[in-house]
Amino acid sequence: MQEFHHNMFDGPGVRIHYVSAGTPPTDGGGDRTIVLLHGWPQTWWEWRHIIEPLRSDGWFVVAPDVRGAGGSSKPEGGYDKQTMAGDIRALLHHLGVTNPITLVGHDLGMLVAYAYASLYPHEVERLVLMEAPIPGTEAYESSLATTKYSANKLWHFHFHGAAGNEAETLIAGSEFPYLRNFYVKLSADPDAISMADVKRYVADYTAPGAMRAGLELFRAFEKDADDNRRVLSEKGKLKMPVLGLGGTASFFLPVAEKMISEVAENVTVRPIEDSGHWIAEEQPETLLRRLHEFIQATGEK
């Protein structure tokens, strides 16, 4: 990991920690930038297995800790996904990225990636969406309403999204078993996220303000749904190529094509075999292969 560079960026109302690899445009790098947006309860560390292979393939890789996570600051507000997309855009402008990017989002990072692509479509060459329902779509509403998904896979959306601080109060003191339950239950390979990795994530999410900030991501879903419906009505569906990736042992694949087709015109959905929810950690080599196939198929040599 000697090629990973850690830096801080002071954006509007937030301080963003980010990891980069490769040469940025401001230092004479090329025009191939890939941005990796992590999910909950994770940080940039989610991408540790694929950053170096992407850099070796000629990409300038940017993997930030989103607002409220990891080494980034934890402001009181701004956890709607459009505001968080603005954080990422400001970071990329700071780094001198001017050409359209390849944007990859997983879990709640997928919602930030979608918000970015919907707001700034000309800045995204291709979009990869993994393992989350998009608020404001019919598929999102049906997933939460369907007992099969809501009770078994998405129960925490209701718990985390409730107003007040009851969730923080109930989780406090039990952060390790609570968070580890997600890594184990939502995986096809429970060992893919090791005990050392769990301890790292738990340390990040027990930092002052971190659990509250993480839950605010869920509490913003109603606003996210309104924002997504409004932008879709104003701008229409996404035109750039969109790849949906889901683990074969996860909830996403059965709803992915219908859901993404509600918001995008050029949609491909591919499975990640022998993976649950945590694709980048369970099957990083398959993820890299799927990314390479998608990039080649959409015009990159």
Image (cartoon, rainbow, N blue to C red):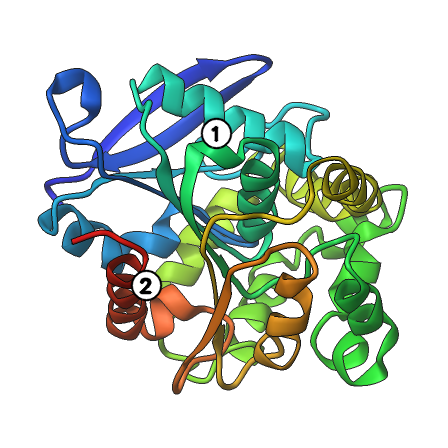
Left or right position of 249 against 270:
right
Which residue is painted at 60% across and 72% down in the image?
A: 257
- Front tag of 1 and 2: 2
Badge 2 density bin: few <14, some 14–19, many ≥20, Cα 10 Å = many
The quadrant in which the C terminus is found is bottom left
Please state which of residues 164 and 150 is positioned toward the viewer in this rendering. 150
Name the residue located 26 percent from the left edge and 30 percent from the top edge: 6
**Residue 167 position within the rendered picture, expressed as x and y whole percent measured from the top left:** 80, 52
Q: What residue lies at 10% left-to-right and 20% top-to-bottom?
A: 28
Toward the viewer: 300 or 140?
300
* In the rendered image, the vertical position of residue 244 relative to residue 110, given as above or below: below
Residue at image position (24%, 71%) is: 285
Query: Viewer-proximal residue, 209 or 111?
Result: 111
Give the structural element (helix, strand or loop) at label 1.
helix
Q: Position of residue 268 (x, y in %)?
A: 47, 69
- The tag earlier along the polypeptide, 1 or 2, is 1
Q: Mark 1, residues whose alpha carbon is within 10 Å: few (<14), some, or many (≥20)? A: many
- Identify residue type, mark 1: Ile
Under mark 2, the amino acid is Phe
Per the image, the residue denoted by label 2 is 294
Q: Position of residue 288 (x, y in %)?
A: 26, 65
**Residue marked by disc 1:** 88
Q: CA distance from mark 1 to mark 2?
A: 23 Å
Q: Which mark is residue 183?
A: none
